[in-house]
Image (tube, rainbow, N blue to C red):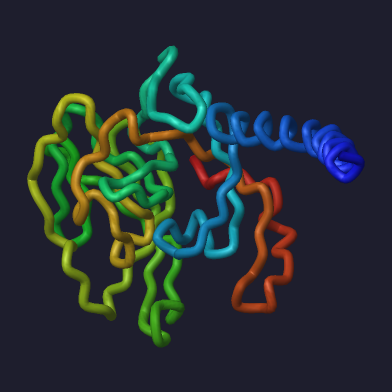
Amino acid sequence: MRVNEKSKKRLRRIWLWVRPLLLVAIVVSAFRSAVADWNDVPSGSMKPNILEGDRILVNKLAYDLKVPFTFWRLARWADPARGDVVVLFDAVGTRLVKRVIGLPGDVVELRGDRLIVNGVLAAYTLDGSDRGGPGGTPRVRLVERIASMPAHPIVLLPGIVAERRDFGPITVPEGHYFCMGDNRDLSRDSRYFGFIPRGHIVGRVRYIALSLDPSDHYLPRWERFGRPLTRE
């Protein structure tokens, strides 16, 4: 009997200690799920704007309010705009960061890596070139301008074989979006997995919180801390 009483008291003390920590964990998790979050970026599909090792800030209230841990929408006040950088889930539930290229009703195509939206060819300005592609292959940086989309840098890799430099034309269905990476020849995006349902876009990205360089022992890249994504 005494042993049971002692065990109960011990468990009660443990629960009193754990309960506030558990409550904090639930509140923080709910906040990250529905209000704001930060995500590590493991790949270079959004170069040159987002690099491997960047940690991005995700505003999950940019477009709507969802029930934490679900896609259920409680309120909606905006929709993604062409050019927004967003965090989304593809059809198999993989979390990705991409740029919105096509809105519902848009006709999107790609010809030789040149973007065409609703029959309008994007304008490109050379922003530099080097041999920073895979295995030292050539890499070209361009500034892309089209329609209402804010001008933004992209990367092309003319020295590698890429599957989807020519694509479409396709019409974006109602309630869906066409999204692409800025590193056009090394991005798995809507050219491969299709349109993104509106409810699978979970937030907008405008800032890099911090950055660690995986190629240099994860040392901080101080110049990227708090940096806004490039826009003109």
From the viewer's side, name the closer residue of 163 and 17.
Answer: 17
The residue positioned farthest toward the left in the image shown: 169
Residue 216 drawn at (x, y percent) = 66, 78
Residue placed at 45% from the left, 64% from the top?
A: 44
Residue 173 falls in image quadrant: top left
Residue 185 drawn at (x, y percent) = 29, 66
Q: Residue 12, relative to residue 192: is it above or below?
A: above
Residue placed at 52% from the left, 57% from the top?
A: 41
Q: Which quadrant is the N terminus positioned in?
A: top right
From the viewer's side, name the closer residue of 109 and 29.
Answer: 29
State the count of labels.
Answer: 0
Residue 53 drawn at (x, y percent) = 59, 63
Residue 186 falls in image quadrant: bottom left
Residue placed at 60% from the left, 35% from the top?
A: 32
Residue 85 falls in image quadrant: top left
Residue 6 drawn at (x, y percent) = 90, 41
The residue positioned farthest toward the bottom in the image shown: 135
Q: Residue 141, relative to residue 27: is it above or below?
A: below
Q: Is residue 142 visible?
A: no
Q: Is residue 46 visible?
A: yes
Q: Residue 225, relative to residue 105: is it above or below?
A: below
